[in-house]
Image: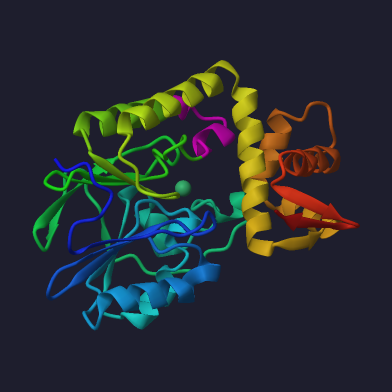
């Protein structure tokens, strides 16, 4: 298996920032499949990127690894641009998409926005699809999100891991915010990725990487720290949610930001479980100040600014 980060012909890795997930476009002579669509505020940029690489081909399908707003926020714009494309989502979320249940889909918990879209089909564990010369297999990889899928292409060695494995860690373990166990699933999903023996990881955020063994060591050591000290995961989760919103807003008056935080029910749950004896307002200030201490944010008078 070639240990290269240059994708084979017909596989386009569209690296995005942290607000939008990466997008992977698989193309052959007649059709194309897009995996994940980024955050809604970048949807037109996503559309431009996809159109550029489609080079006039139709988009046959959109596949979402999971339905966090930074992975499916561009679905609505892409569906409008490509009305014949079918959209495939993980089965655990399909009914919530049909009813558009923003609470069950997590958008109220995160305080993030995702424009409603239509899902046509559910992915299946073990499902395989072929684009050009490459077959892609679908696997369930819960943990970060209980319904998340990963995709693996045996002949290229590429594994599209979404937020189950990054070069340095993995995404927030959302079930833990809800008081449910998610760490065991994270561990099982890391074992699954290892068992596939991928040669290249296309993560949901960050660049592709080939040191899979090193990434698995770092992810497992991070997981061990979280298991030994769930408080540290809760603090990390709160900081990630706040930093994500700051990435979106770029600059926000601190009192208005506190008002937003009170509407994001995941933050309320994290405060409830790990308040450190602070009121919600003071706990939220502590989280914001922690972002400033780690240089992820700056304060300018009454404003918090993304850094
Ligand atoms: Zn995610």
Q: Residue at x 79, y 26 (%)?
A: 276
Q: In the displayed structure, would residue 52 be above or below residue 297?
A: below
Q: In the displayed structure, would residue 120 be above or below residue 227?
A: below
Asked if residue 179 lies in the magenta stretch, the reply is yes
Q: Residue at x 68, y 63 (%)?
A: 249
Quadrant in which the N terminus appears: top left
Asked whether residue 178 appears in the rendered view, the answer is no
In terms of depth relative to the viewer, which is nearer, 268 or 39?
Answer: 39
Q: Left or right? Give the position of 284 relative to 42.
A: right
Q: Left or right? Give the position of 179 relative to 131.
A: right
Q: Position of residue 196 (x, y in %)?
A: 20, 34
Magenta residues (range): 172-185
Asked if residue 285 lies in the magenta stretch, the reply is no
Residue lying farthest to the left in this orientation? 133
Q: In the displayed structure, would residue 84 be above or below residue 73?
A: below
Colouring used for the render: rainbow
Residue lying farthest to the top in this orientation? 228
Q: Residue at x 53, y 51 (%)?
A: 106
Q: In the displayed structure, would residue 195 be above or below residue 52?
A: above
Asked whether residue 234 appears in the rendered view, the answer is yes
Q: Position of residue 246 (x, y in %)?
A: 68, 56
Q: Position of residue 199 (x, y in %)?
A: 23, 39
Q: Residue at x 30, y 26 (%)?
A: 191
């Amino acid at each position: 298996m070639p240990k290269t980060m240059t994708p084979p012909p017909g596989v386009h890795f569209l690296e995005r920032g942290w607000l939008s997930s990466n997008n992977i476009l698989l193309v052959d002579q007649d059709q194309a499949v897009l995996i994940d669509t980024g955050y809604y505020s970048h949807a037109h940029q996503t559309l431009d990127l996809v159109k550029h690489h489609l080079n006039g081909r139709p988009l046959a399908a959109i596949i979402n690894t999971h339905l966090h707003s930074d992975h499916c926020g561009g679905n609505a714009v892409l569906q409008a641009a490509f009305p014949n494309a079918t959209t495939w989502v993980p089965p655990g979320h399909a009914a919530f998409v049909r009813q558009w249940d923003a609470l069950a889909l997590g958008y109220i918990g995160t305080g993030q926005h995702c424009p409603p879209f239509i899902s046509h089909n559910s992915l299946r564990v073990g499902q395989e699809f072929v684009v050009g010369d490459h077959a892609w297999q679908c696997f369930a990889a819960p943990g970060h999100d209980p319904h998340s899928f990963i995709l693996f292409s045996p002949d290229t060695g590429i594994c599209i891991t979404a937020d189950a494995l990054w070069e340095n860690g993995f995404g927030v373990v959302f079930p833990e915010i809800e008081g449910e166990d998610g760490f065991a699933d994270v561990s099982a999903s890391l074992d699954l990725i290892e068992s596939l023996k991928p040669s290249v990881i296309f993560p949901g955020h960050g660049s592709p990487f080939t040191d899979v063994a090193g990434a698995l060591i770092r992810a497992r050591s991070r997981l061990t720290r979280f298991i030994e000290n769930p408080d540290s995961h809760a603090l990390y989760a709160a900081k990630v949610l706040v930093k994500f919103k700051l990435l979106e807003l770029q600059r926000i008056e601190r009192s208005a930001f506190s008002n937003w935080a009170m509407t994001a029910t995941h933050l309320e749950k994290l405060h409830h479980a790990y308040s450190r004896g602070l009121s919600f307002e003071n706990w939220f200030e502590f989280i914001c100040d922690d972002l400033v201490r780690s240089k992820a944010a700056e304060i300018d008078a009454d404003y918090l600014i993304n850094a």
